[in-house]
Amino acid sequence: MRANLNLKWIMGVLLISLSPLVLGQEKAEPNLSDKLHTEYKANGIDQSLKMYEKLNADKNYNGFEEPLNILGYTLMLEDQDLDAAKKVFEAQIAEYSDEANPYDSYADLLLEMGNKEEAKKNLKKSVDLAEKSETDLDQQIFRASKAKLAKLENKHKTFEFLNGNYDIDISNYEDGKVSNNNKMHSEASYDESGNILTVKLTNQAEQVIGKRIVVYDAVEDRYDMAFLNTNEPLGIRVSHMKIKDLGNNKMEFMETYKDRKGKEQKAKHEIMKNDGAVEWVIFEQAENSNEWEKVVVQNFNKSK
């Protein structure tokens, strides 16, 4: 069973891994990965791995161009022999256990085999190893492994509860008391990849008053949000959110952004989800104080 991941999303890394294979076809003399694949076709994967032990004179790890790495992806994608690919990727880990990429590659295979939990373990190992290195290869692997891990943990779908249509009752507060009330409507949806959430906000006259775009940043482990206000066309306001799950359908978001004067500001969001309804409370810090003041309460109810 295929892992429930967007294949195009994975293929970005895989194509880089396979590019030496394509280039190798232009050479008159087959490279080691070609020889290993020919041996696999003739005598099976065990004999192919024995050939690797005999012919692999270069003990340095060659990253995406490593013969075992190329062979493993060839077996997985072209031959669709997942059992043989498993042996190859495991051999690559045994040979280069201190390198990050073998674990990332093995995780790709585990995803193809439907083993998400083992894939997560290998991606975490890849991240731990790559994070300690400053090479271009490991920085690339670090980003790729973090992105795959975040996808498997559904971190890109944290805001899924906003998906769909909601009627929103808004109460603004000053000095602890309601200063005014308002209503608006939100229409939210993810893009085809399931990574980017777009929220359209309209007023009671069905006029668009703003849009929000939210995407997860796997490397920084945060959510980046862009807000476009059509009532006040002052460009795009960008903010970043760190999220804490408090349990019992309650979440806390800590938002940071810069105001028009370039000063960093913070806001705290408390979200309570309850059977299709959402209470979203926003707090800001009082001037010259660390105390949080409630400034907005938004009650979301699914549109009928």
Image (cartoon, rainbow, N blue to C red):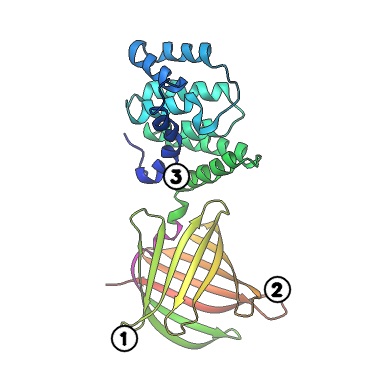
Q: Assess whether mark 2 and mark 1 are in contact (beta carbons under 8 angstroms).
A: no
| Residue for badge 1 | 205
Q: CA distance from mark 3 to mark 2?
A: 37 Å
Looking at the rendering, the stretch of residues picked out in magenta corresponds to 158-167
Quadrant for the N terminus in the image: top left
| Residue for badge 3 | 152
Would you say 78 lies left or right of 61 here? left
Residue at the spot x=59%, y=39% of the render? 138
Would you say 289 lies left or right of 88 here? right
Badge 3 or badge 2: first in the primary sequence: 3
Q: Give the label, 3 or 2, closer to the camera.
A: 3
Q: Assess whether mark 2 and mark 3 are in contact (beta carbons under 8 angstroms).
A: no
Q: CA distance from mark 3 to mark 1?
A: 40 Å
| Residue for badge 2 | 290
Compare residues 153 and 198 and report the one nearer the observer: 198
Vertically, is 199 above or below 99? below
Q: Specify few, some or many for label 2: CA neighbours under 10 Å numbering under 14, 14-19, or 20 or more.
A: few
Q: Assess whether mark 1 and mark 3 are in contact (beta carbons under 8 angstroms).
A: no
Residue at the spot x=54%, y=74% of the render? 282
Residue 159 placement (x, y as % from top left): 44, 61
Compare residues 248 and 93 and report the one nearer the observer: 93
> Does the image show residue 112?
yes
Badge 1 or badge 2: first in the primary sequence: 1
Amino acid type, label 2 = Asn
Element on which disc 2 rests? loop
Would you say 267 lies left or right of 1 here? right
